[in-house]
Image (tube, rainbow, N blue to C red):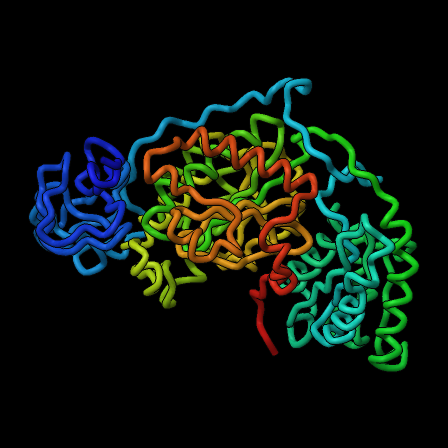
Amino acid sequence: MNAVALCPAIRLDPNDNVVIARALIPEGTQVAGENVTTQQTIPSGHKLSSRAIGKGEPVFKGRAVIGYASESLVAGTWLHTHNLMVEGRAQAPLAQTPIAEPMAPLPTSQRATFQGIVRADGQVGTRNYIGVLVVGNCGASAARQAADWFDADELAAYPNVDGVVPLIHEIGCGMELTGEPMELLRRTISGFIRHPNIAAAVVVALGCERNNLGVFLEKEGLVVGEKLKTVTIQEAGGIRNTVELAKQYIRDMLPAVDAVCRQTVSAEHLLVAMQSSTQDGFCGITANPVLGRVADLVVLNGGTVVVSETPEWLWMQQRIRDRSATPEVWTKIANRLGWWREHGRGRDTEMSGRLNGALQEAGLSTPLEKAIDSFTKTGTTPLRDAYEYAHAIKAKGLVFMDTPDADAISVTGQVAGGANLVLMSTGTGTSFGSLPIPTLKLASNLRTFERISSDIDMHCGALLSGEDCVDGLAKIVFACLLEVASGLRTKGEANGVDANEYIPWSIGVVA
C-alpha cells in the first residue's frame, strides 16, 4: 500500500492541533494515525483540526500560531478562512526557535565550483548580455526595437553572447525631480548597468525626462566609454535614427562581449535571490524548506543569499529579531518594517489581514500562515546585513533587502543589488523569469509541475510521497543551481518569458 493511502494527512509537529491533507479527503473519512473523522471534504493542501479547538484558541501548525479559531471546532473540521482569524494582528505568538548560529564557510579548497564569467572588476557573472536601457519610458520603443533586431540569426557569429536585452520601464517622467523615488530609480538602472551579467550597455533617452540622462550618469558615477554608450532621441533626429545608432553601438560592442571564456570559480561568487510565488498549502512543508536548505548550502560554500518580500515580515518580527546577527541589522530591518506599517495602514492588502482568493483556494488561511511558510526558505543562518531597495549587496551570508511582495518588482531590486541567480518556489505555478539573470523554479507538488512543466524546472512531489527528504532534494537543487550558474538554460530562458519582468519600484508622487 502506498504512503498516501496510509497517511492521508501530514503532521508537522506532535503538539500541532491541525494536520494538512496530502490529497483531497472525502467527508466521513477516518484519518489514519489521527483518530479523527473528517466532518467535511478537505481539499488537497488544506488543514483539518486534529482535536477539538475552542473559540479564540490559537491554531498551531509546525509549532507556530497561524491564527485563532473564530468558533468552536470539533475534531476533523475543515479549518480555513471561514473559521480562522488573525484578529488584525501584525504580531502573533510564534514557536520558539533557536537563535541562529553563524555558519563557518567551508575552506576554499572544499567549496563547490561553477563555470562563471569573471569581469575586469572581479565580479562574476552567470550570463553574458548586452543591455539596452532607458532613463525614462519615452525611450522604451527605440530601446526595444534596437534590442529586438539582434535575434538568433544576427547573433549567430557570437556564440558567447547570450543576447541583447531591452530593460525598459514605465517611469522616469511625471515624478519628483529629487528625493527617494528618483534616487531609487537611478540606483536600480545603474545597478543593472554595473551587473556582472551585463557585459556592455546602451542607454536611450528622449532628452527631456525628469530623470535627466546627464544628471543620472553624474549621480551614479557612470562614464561613457567602449562598454557604455548613450543615445538621445531629440539629438539623434528621431526614433529611426536613434534605433540605427543604438544598433551600430551594439554591433561595435559584440566582438569584445563575445571574447569571454567561462572559467572555474568558487561558489562563494553565487549571490542567490530567494523568492516565493503563487504559494499553496504545500509550499511551507516542501519547496520552501528545500530552498532554506539550499540557502544554507550557499552560505556554507561562502556565497550570499538575499531574501526580501518585506510585507510578509510584518507578521513575525520577534523571529526576525532572533535571526539578526547584530542589533544594528535588526534596527535596519525594523526601520523598513515601520515604513511598511505606515504605508499599508488602512489599505486593502495582505497587511490588513486578508489573503486573495487564489491563495485561499490553494490552502492558505491567513497572511500569518503565508508569512511563516515563506520564511522557511531563509534557512537557519543569521541575517548578516540589511539593504534598502536596489542597493549594492556587499556582505556574505544571508542578507535582507527591502522590497514589495510583487515578484517582478522584488526581483528587480535584488538583481540591481547584484544577485546573479533567482531560486523561486511556487505552489500553483508561475511563468516568471528575469533577464539578465536566470530563474530556477521549484514546484511544491507533482500535480502543479505536471500541469505547467514547460515553465517549471523541478518539483518537490517526492517529499509528499515520502520518497525523498528535504536534505536529499536540496542537494539535487543545489547541484542544478551550479549547472544553471555555469550556463544551463532554465525553462524560463528557453521560453523567452524573461524580458518583461524588469520593473523598478515606483513609490513616489506621480504628477
Would residue 203 be found to the left or right of residue 179 on screen? Answer: right
Q: Residue at x 67, y 64 (%)?
A: 182
Q: Nearer the viewer, residue 124 or 321?
A: 124
At x 64%, y 59%, the residue is: 184
Q: Could you say which is closer to the camera, residue 138 or residue 428?
A: 428
Q: Residue at x 18, y 44 (%)?
A: 58
Above-or-below relation of 101 to 140? above
Assign the C terminus to one quadrant of the image. Answer: bottom right
Does residue 109 lie above or below 37 as drawn? above
| Residue 52 placement (x, y as % from top left) | 8, 44
Find residue 188 and report its horizontal and vertical position in percent: 67, 57
Looking at the image, can residue 402 be seen? yes
The x and y percentages for residue 103 are: 52, 23
Q: In percent of the image, x 32 and y 38: which residue is there?
A: 465
The answer to whether 216 appears left or right of 442 in the picture is: right
Taking the view exactly as shown, the residue that stands out farthest to the bottom is 238
The one nearer the camera, 155 or 313, is 155
Relative to residue 51, is residue 204 drawn left or right?
right
Task: Give the position of the N terminus as an image quadrant.
Answer: top left
Number of marks in the image?
A: 0
**Nearer to the camera, 31 or 71:** 31
The extreme front residue here reads 1
Asked where in the image residue 262 lies, by quadrant, the reply is top right
Point out residue 5 in the picture as x, y percentages from the top left corner: 21, 40
Tell me if I can see residue 335 in this picture: no
